[in-house]
Amino acid sequence: MESIYKSEIFFFISSISVVLITVVFIIFSFYLIKIMRNFSHMSEKLKETVDGATSSLEEVGDKIKESSIFNFFFGVKKRNRKNKN
């Protein structure tokens, strides 16, 4: 008879532990999904910013190369053309 009481106590404690572990896992999963969505949003914003900065830097580089001061100091590169016969 005493073993039946012990088994009932064991199953009761096991059931409570499984329920608690499940609740903790669900809460952890909720926050993990929230963090991953936030990270995804931040990475998209960062990509847009880098793409914008890249195009801006290319425009600035082109303007500098076309400026007369740049051409005065560094000159215009001449291309070597070989005649094919």
Image (tube, rainbow, N blue to C red):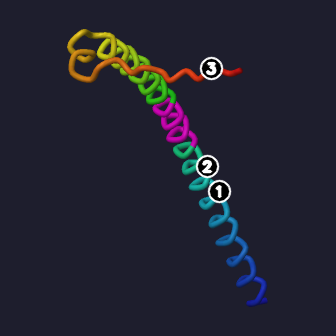
Q: Residue at x 29, y 19 (%)?
A: 75
* Residue contact at pointers 1 and 2, CB within 8 angstroms: yes
The quarter of the picture where residue 5 lies is bottom right
Q: Earlier in the sequence, mark 1 or mark 3?
A: 1
- The region drawn magenta spans 33-43
Magenta region, mostly helix, strand or loop?
Answer: helix
Question: Which is nearer the eye, 34 or 6?
Answer: 34
Q: Residues within 10 Å of mark 3 (few under 14, many from 20)?
A: few
Compute the Cα span from label 1 to label 3. Answer: 79 Å
The quarter of the rendered structure image containing the C terminus is: top right
Three-letter amino acid code at the position of disc 1: Thr
* Residue sitting nearer the eye, 8 or 14: 14
Q: Where does the image place residue 46, in percent across and percent down from the top left?
A: 44, 30
Q: CA distance from mark 2 to mark 3?
A: 75 Å
Indicate whether 83 appears above or below 8.
Answer: above
| x then y, percent, for residue 81 | 55, 21
Residue 49 in the image, given as x and y percentages of width and height = 42, 24
Horizontal and vertical percent for residue 29?
59, 48
Q: Label 1: how many residues lie within 10 Å, few (<14), some (14-19) or many (20+)?
A: few
Secondary structure of residue under mark 3: loop
The residue pinned by badge 1 equals: 22
- Name the residue carrying label 2: 26
Q: Is residue 47 magenta?
A: no
Secondary element at image label 2: helix
Quadrant of the image containing the N terminus: bottom right
**Residue depicted at 49% across the width and 33% down the height:** 43
Mark nearer the viewer, 1 or 3: 3
Residue receiving disc 3: 83
Quadrant position of residue 3:
bottom right
Q: Amino acid at mark 2?
A: Ile
